[in-house]
Image (spheres, rainbow, N blue to C red):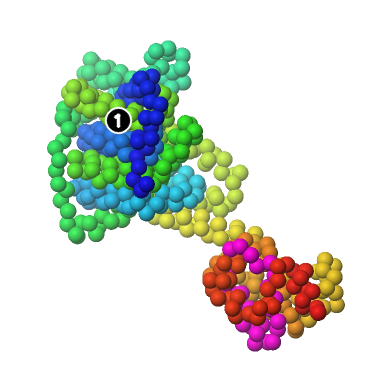
Amino acid sequence: MLFHPKILDSFAGYNRTLLTKDVLAGLTVGVVALPLAMAFAIASGLKPESGIFTAIIAGGLISLLGGSRVQIGGPAGAFIVIVYGIVERYGVPNLLLATAMSGILLFLMGVFRLGTLVRFIPIAVIIGFTNGIAFLIGLSQIKDFFGLTIEKMPAQFFPAAQALYQAADTFNPIALGLAVGSLIFIIVWKLFQKRLGWLSHLPGTVVAMVTATIFASLLNLPVETIGSRFGGIPSSLPSFEWIPISWESAQYMLMPALTLALLGAIESLLCARIADGLTHERHESNQELMAQGIANLTTPFFGGMPATGTIARTVTNIESGATTPVSGIVHALTLLMIILFAAPLAKDIPLASLAAILMYVAWNMGDWKKFIDLKQFRLPYRITILSVFILTVVLDLTIAVQVGLLLAFITFIYRISSLSRCEIALASDFAGLRNQQGRIDAYRIHGAIFFGAVKLLEKIETNLPSNTLLLDLKNVIYIDTSGMDTIMELAHLCKIRNIRLLICGLAHQPLEMAERSNFIATLPADSFYPDLISGIEAATT
């Protein structure tokens, strides 16, 4: 079935015990998601409620319609850099348009069964841009972490670094102390969480945020808060509003939308694969993409931001005992209850504490160990991962991924072509070739004959025998159109020079390619033999 949410298959054998686990896991993840949703929205240049609304609406839809049992959807750190750049360059209305367009693209990717193609993106490219995004998230939080006075943080790396340098003398030591204290608290809590008894169920990020808020409020600390910058968050969901759409705007937003869709697809399916490894289940990638598409198409009409699968919250959901998408729906309802009944309390949350939370998220988001171990990898791998990282930081994620894929493609072509080889059959191995050198020559080809390896056959053309040429294709696993064209050119050259061409061991995909290209029909019926030995016997009799 084309559209079949995982939740429809999740209730076989469902009972009160599993429901209790799902509800408790959903409550836990909802609490964990609260500070992250606000922090991601603020770091993206949006109001904190945009992140919460996205976690509620998109999170609920992704769990309800998705292809994974336990994946949690919502705003993600990976989107921060992209969303901030779109907001700065095009404005919030166009961000909403780009998000809706990305939703359509994601849904179409699922409809056309493109979910498996995302898995073909090399790990070096994924690590490169993930680490690059993590670095940029950390850079973007320096302003609030140190309490710097900067009216508007630029989106690009060099202008942002310059703005931070110029504002270095405006740092707020109290904000810095609060941020450092929050960060240390989160790290220590994580290290000793298993020894805290019933408190171990509380996420360190939430405890750090609440502690910092109480501390700052009681002492009336001079630090910036959600209330001082945004006026707090509303205690109700937004009403439905149509997005302003024009053909001119849609043209400009196509590339940003494509970037959001590609990143959302990679993040959600990577998250689903991690969930599969922890639960020993199997997600449906195309159904997940369609759910992500519906969620991203819906949230902009309620003032939301882009959403995808979130690794940290999904892992928390699994560790909390979740078994079905019900936990994800409870997580969305938990955030809804917090909005409806506890929104006024959010105005006192210090931005320095949220910056510390994002610093912690950014550090855990990156796979920094791969950078430390770079020496053990081949040079092409190192070039790819570093190129994608640097281009993500300095230029743009889209350019970084394009360059990374190009480098990976070139590396792959080089490696595959180096595995293909062409060897002349020796008389010591085949008695029928004795005293026939220069008159009857046989070549054994191994690997793939494709556009990157056609030079193997071109070398044969420069040293053709006088009477018969044998090609042993038994060990050829693949021939592409370029390879087939080269073989046909070789056959044509043999015909012109009145040299008999015998093809041996043609089978499987190479045989199918030879039939489709009509190559077989161009040669006499006695030109094909099952193996090289029978071909040599035919040539020498």
Seen from the viewer's position, the closer of residues 535 and 186 is: 535
What's the amino acid at mark 1?
Answer: Ile
**Residue 50 in the image, given as x and y percentages of width and height:** 23, 36
Decide: is 127 above or below 475: above
Q: Residues within 10 Å of mark 1 (few under 14, many from 20)?
A: many
Seen from the viewer's position, the closer of residues 472 and 507 is: 507
Q: How many marks?
A: 1
Q: Name which residue lies at 37% across and 30% down.
A: 11
**In this rendering, does residue 172 appear at all?**
no
Seen from the viewer's position, the closer of residues 255 and 219 is: 255
Decide: is 63 above or below 193: below
The residue singled out by tag 1 in the image is: 329
Q: Name which residue lies at 60% across and 67% down.
A: 511
Q: Secondary structure at mark 1?
A: helix
Q: What's drawn in magenta, residue-wise?
A: 482-509
**Residue 91 in the image, given as x and y percentages of width and height:** 20, 48
**Residue 8 in the image, given as x and y percentages of width and height:** 35, 36
Looking at the magenta stretch, what is its main secondary structure? helix
- Is residue 456 located in the magenta-colored stretch of the structure? no
Seen from the viewer's position, the closer of residues 281 and 10 is: 10
Q: Name which residue lies at 50% across and 47% down.
A: 124
- Seen in the image, is 496 located left or right of residue 138? right
Of the 4 image quadrants, the one containing the C terminus is bottom right
**Residue 421 in the image, given as x and y percentages of width and height:** 68, 64
- Seen in the image, is 159 located left or right of residue 421? left
Q: Name which residue lies at 26% across and 17% down.
A: 214
- Is residue 498 located in the magenta-colored stretch of the structure? yes
**In this rendering, does residue 241 appear at all?**
yes
Task: Indicate the quadrant where residue 287 lies.
Answer: top left
Task: Indicate the quadrant where residue 523 lies.
Answer: bottom right
